Image: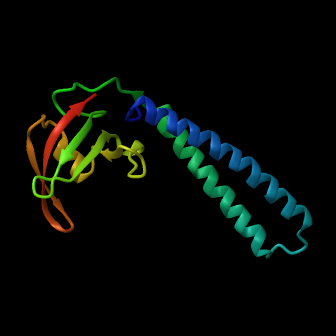
Amino acid sequence: MAREVKLTKAGYERLMQQLLQERERLQEATRILQELMESSDDYDDSGLEAAKQEKARIEARIDSLEDILSRAVIIEGAATEVISLGSVVELEDPVTGERLEVQVVSPAEASVLETPMKISDASPMGKALLGHREGDVLSLETPKGKKEFRVVSVRG
């Protein structure tokens, strides 16, 4: 049996939206490819080859999204006391006082472009967060050296 992919409800919906967008892109890429094939006299046409490659990339992305979504298990709200998959965590740097809010999610859902940042439970930071509680201080090895964070709050 294929391994399940745990997603938050929002993450599942975001991936579904991406799938719909990729399917629209595929329709457009197919239309462009057909036009190029009809108008091309030369089989070595670089535009035709680029269109074929783009269509193949879109199809691969659709296959990947469909695979993830077919194995998806939507996780309910996380336990609020202990950091687990789905927890939204506010962290504070004890030295600078700088605060950071992250959500611990599966790798399929991870994205630093969202607010709060979606941190994979397989990443070094995600692994370091799991199992901690409010008030805990955790150490994390970063490319810039060891960094400490204090867990300010945990919510599901």
Q: What's the coloring here?
A: rainbow
Relative to residue 36, is residue 5 drawn left or right?
Answer: left
Q: Position of residue 9 (x, y in %)?
A: 43, 29
State left or right for residue 10 relative to residue 88.
right
Q: Furthest residue to the front?
A: 97
- The tally of labels here is 0
From this view, report whether residue 115 is shown above or below residue 124: above
94 and 25: which is toward the camera? 94
- Report the quarter where the C terminus lies: top left
What is the quadrant of the N terminus in the image? top left
Q: Name the spot of residue 146 as percent of width and height, x first.
A: 12, 62
- The residue closer to the viewer here, 32 or 48, is 32
Q: Residue at x 16, y 30 (%)?
A: 82
Location of residue 135 in the rendering, given as x and y in whole percent from the top left corner: 9, 38
- x and y, in percent, of residue 48 in the image: 78, 68
Residue drawn at 69 percent across, 56 percent down? 55
Q: Residue at x 44, y 36 (%)?
A: 11
Q: Is residue 95 left or right of residue 98?
A: left
From what the image shows, is residue 139 above or below residue 153?
Answer: below
Q: Residue at x 61, y 57 (%)?
A: 57
The answer to whether 136 appears left or right of 4 in the picture is left
